[in-house]
Image: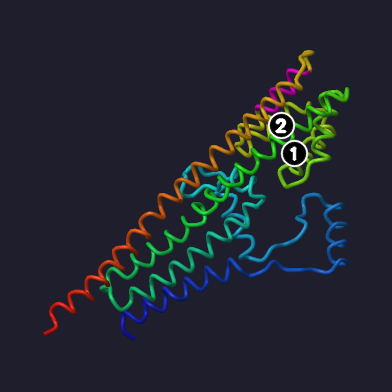
Amino acid sequence: MSTVPLLLALGVAAGLALVAGAVVPARRESLAVTIARVDAITANPDQPLYRSRWWQSGLERLTATCSKSSRRWWSIPAADLMVLRQTPLAFTTRRLTAAGIGLLAATVLGAGVLPLAQLPLAGLAGAALGWLLPASLVARAAKAARVEFAAAIAVLCDLTAQERDAGRAPAQAIAEATAVADGWAATLVRARLRSAQRLGHTPADALTALSEQVQVRELADLAEIIATAAEGAAISRALRDKATALRATAIQTATATANARVEWLVWPVALLVVGMLLLVLRGVATQVLTP
């Protein structure tokens, strides 16, 4: 067997192995087996609840390693994943799947056009590109989600101001506002406020911590306004001003995005006009030059 088919087979096998290891579903067990395992872990706390299969354990260890890393190309964007309501394990799965597809595609496409010595490098380059692609997609989606989150904060500011005008305390006002509001952002804030209430934390501290985790500055501003109410300040006007400012910022962002898309459409339209002009000139030239 020659070297080129061997390298091609190894590259294809490695790509398929990465894809298969990432997309294989987790093992499902019956309720009786799960209850038995819970009883066992209760009797022996040092015993793990279940034994993962080797690829699942490897995926969990890889996720833990990436979570501890500070390198941008290797670390997991925890804030972006949280605002998108995705888990780090699912993100690592996407990375492995994309890396396997990149390795497979680069090996197959490069087998016929690249020298033998460059074939492994092409496979590694394809795997690296696939590994980096999910992070870029997640960052772009998280940016749009944060804009949506800021719009939800504007609604929460208005609702909290209405509750304060009704005579409710700051903590009760923000809790009632999140209970009335709809959407994933309000649900996330509501869950965090309920958790803070059980732990004995103030709503301002809970909102500040959530703002740092999802990296939404507008949520920290709302927390600061709520915190000033504990000192006796009237916050209804401040909440309404903040909501107005957030809506104005959202309108400006939407306008800038629309203008950028319109400017980008200039080039396709220009190419279309040039193509039509060339067709007209070709017809005229044909009639003129034809004897």
Magenta region includes residue 72? no
Q: Which mark is residue 207?
A: 2
The chief SS type of the magenta part is helix
- Which range is magenta? 221-229
Asked if the residue under mark 1 is in contact with the one under mark 2, i.e. CB atoms within 8 Å, the reply is yes
Name the disc covering residue 89, or none.
Answer: none
Q: Secondary structure at mark 1?
A: helix
Residue 157: x and y, percent? 73, 31
Disc assigned to residue 189: 1
| Alpha-carbon span between mark 2 and mark 1 | 7 Å
Task: Pick whichever, 62 or 146, lies toward us.
Answer: 146
In this view, which residue lies farthest toward the top? Answer: 232
Tell me the residue at 77%/45% (across/down). Answer: 182
For badge 2, the amino acid type reads: Leu
State the scheme by which the image is colored. Answer: rainbow
Q: Is residue 245 above or below residue 234?
A: below
Crowding at mark 2 (Cα within 10 Å: few <14, some 14-19, many 20+)? many
Residue at the spot x=77%, y=50% of the render?
A: 46
Name the residue nearer the viewer: 151 or 48. 151
Disc with the residue nearer the chain's start (2 vs 1)? 1
Q: Residue 24: x and y, percent?
A: 63, 70
Q: Does 129 sit left or right of 191 as displayed?
A: left
Residue kind at label 1, given as amino acid type = Val
The residue at the point 60 percent across, 50 percent down is 64
How far across and down, in percent of the image, does residue 62 sit?
Answer: 56, 55
Q: Is residue 51 left or right of residue 217?
A: right
As rendered, which of 52 and 233 lies closer to the eye?
233
Whole-percent x, y for residue 76 in the image: 55, 48
Q: Quadrant of the C terminus?
A: bottom left
Please tell me in which quadrant of the rendered image residue 127 appears. bottom left
In this view, 62 is above or below 210: below
